[in-house]
């Protein structure tokens, strides 16, 4: 694949800019040409001039081939930004407006981790569920206050996510798809998800399907992670389960994610699962492997399969190296670049 890719870079807060810098370094070392433009967004920007994500900035982001994101958020204990301001106003706004309806999170258990040797992918629905923002207050602040927060599940939204998961499962050697939900209690949304999986399954006779309740999946994820190949689940269950999956497969320092718009009606967004970690920011201590893996996912989406595979192979090899535990941010970026 050739040509230059136009990438919007949102380093963000805390360790975000450091890990994205290493990611861009590694991608260039793999021989892929990038034109990058930095966007100053996140907690620091908001605190400076009140911008979260303006319509104009969002319109400009739309024009890029992909968006590479570091981390967004203030330091823990900093209460100056109301909860939800950046989450809803920046991260979810990008996911919803750019229609990145798949949140793809791959996991491979590094040596010594609970999930050592396992290799599975969580497909998290990324535009609906409890994240859709349905609900509100009645009689707020009174003794009779009511707060509702509904879960929005459309046939359209569930089906496009389930179809993506089946396609992925069908392309993998194990060909197994597990729906994770809570159909025994969430009998409306769960029923829609299960029926959709059952119906689409008819088109994929070689994919084996399974079902786990979310609570049981949390046990299996720790006790038998090897049972998973592709998991498909809703937005909130996927959020929680992928933190657990990260913890059992070597730590959140390795967990990558792709917010994909598979229809390509807008750019996709690539970000590590971890946060801004202000406590170690600016000290060249952060592990950039999750960001670099997210960069590899971006390359795959851009059609740079060869470079993506080479970077992923080097990350897996490097993760076995004791140096991976102690090296600095820049040393890790240099080590990966050097091995390519
Ligand atoms: C994630 C994060 C986000 C989410 C937050 C920061 C809005 O936890 O990407 O998993 O809940 O999706
Ligand atoms: Mn999360």
Image: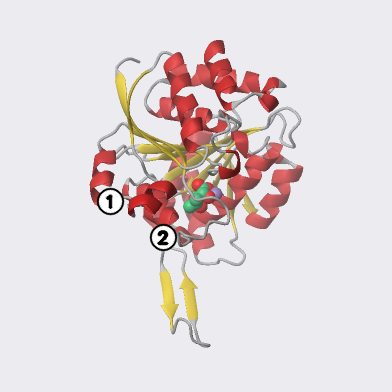
Q: How is the image coloured?
A: secondary structure
Q: In x, y percent, where is residue 102?
A: 44, 44
Q: In x, y percent, where is residue 221?
A: 69, 45
The image shows residue 282, relative to residue 243, as above or below, that is above
The image shows residue 243, relative to residue 119, as above or below, that is below
Label 2: how many Cα within 10 Å (few below 14, some 14–19, many 20+): some
Residue drawn where x is 70% and y is 36% of the image: 226
Instruction: Determine the secondary structure under disc 2.
Output: helix
Residue drawn where x is 45% and y is 81% of the image: 140
- Of 313 and 67, the residue lying toward us: 67
Of labels 1 and 2, earlier in sequence is 1
Residue drawn where x is 28% and y is 51% of the image: 54
- The nearer-to-camera label among 1 and 2 is 1
Q: In x, y percent, where is residue 203?
A: 45, 41
Instruction: Determine the secondary structure under disc 1.
Output: loop
* Residue at the extreme bottom: 143
- Of 85 and 215, the residue lying toward us: 85
Image-quadrant location for residue 88: bottom left
Q: Are marks 1 and 2 in contact (CB under 8 Å)?
A: no
Q: Mark 1 highlights which residue? A: 54
- Left or right of 239? Residue 41 is left
Label 1: how many Cα within 10 Å (few below 14, some 14–19, many 20+): few
Query: Ligand 1: does it lie within 8 Å of the C-beta at label 2?
Result: no
Q: In x, y percent, where is residue 153?
A: 43, 60
Q: Mark 2 highlights which residue? A: 132
Can the viewer see residue 233 in this picture? Answer: no
Query: Ligand 1: does it lie within 8 Å of the C-beta at label 1?
Result: no
Can the viewer see residue 218 in this picture? Answer: yes
- Left or right of 156? Residue 170 is right
Image-quadrant location for residue 245: top right
The image shows residue 170, relative to residue 332, as above or below, that is below
């Amino acid at each position: 694949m050739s040509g230059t890719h136009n990438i919007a870079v949102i380093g963000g807060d805390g360790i975000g800019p450091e890990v994205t810098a290493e990611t861009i370094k590694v991608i260039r070392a793999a021989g892929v040409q990038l034109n990058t433009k930095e966007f100053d967004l996140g907690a620091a920007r908001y605190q400076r001039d009140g911008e979260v994500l303006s319509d104009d900035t969002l319109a400009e982001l739309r024009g890029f081939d992909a968006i590479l994101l570091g981390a967004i958020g203030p330091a823990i204990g900093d209460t100056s930004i109301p909860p939800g301001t950046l989450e809803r106003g920046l991260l979810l706004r990008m996911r919803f407006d750019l229609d990145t309806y798949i949140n793809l999170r791959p996991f491979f258990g590094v040596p010594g981790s609970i999930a050592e040797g396992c290799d599975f992918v969580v497909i998290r629905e990324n535009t609906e569920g409890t994240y859709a923002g349905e609900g509100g207050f009645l009689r707020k602040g009174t003794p009779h206050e009511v707060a509702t927060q509904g879960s929005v599940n459309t046939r359209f939204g569930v089906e496009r996510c389930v179809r993506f998961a089946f396609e992925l499962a069908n392309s993998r050697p194990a060909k197994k798809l597990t729906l994770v939900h809570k159909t025994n209690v969430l009998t409306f949304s769960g029923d829609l998800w299960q029926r959709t999986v059952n119906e689409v399954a008819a088109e994929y006779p070689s994919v084996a399907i399974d079902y786990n309740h979310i609570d049981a999946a949390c046990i299996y994820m720790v006790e038998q992670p090897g049972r998973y190949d592709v998991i498909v689940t809703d937005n909130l269950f996927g959020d929680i389960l992928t933190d657990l999956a990260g913890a059992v497969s070597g730590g959140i320092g390795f967990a990558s994610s792709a917010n994909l718009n598979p229809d390509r009606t807008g750019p996709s967004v690539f970000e590590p699962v971890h946060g801004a970690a202000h406590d170690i920011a600016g000290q060249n201590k952060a592990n950039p492997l999750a960001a670099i893996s997210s960069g590899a996912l971006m390359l795959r989406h851009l059609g740079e399969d060869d470079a993506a595979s080479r970077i992923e192979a080097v990350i897996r090899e490097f993760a076995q190296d004791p140096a991976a535990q102690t090296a600095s941010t820049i040393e890790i970026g240099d080590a990966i670049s050097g091995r390519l």
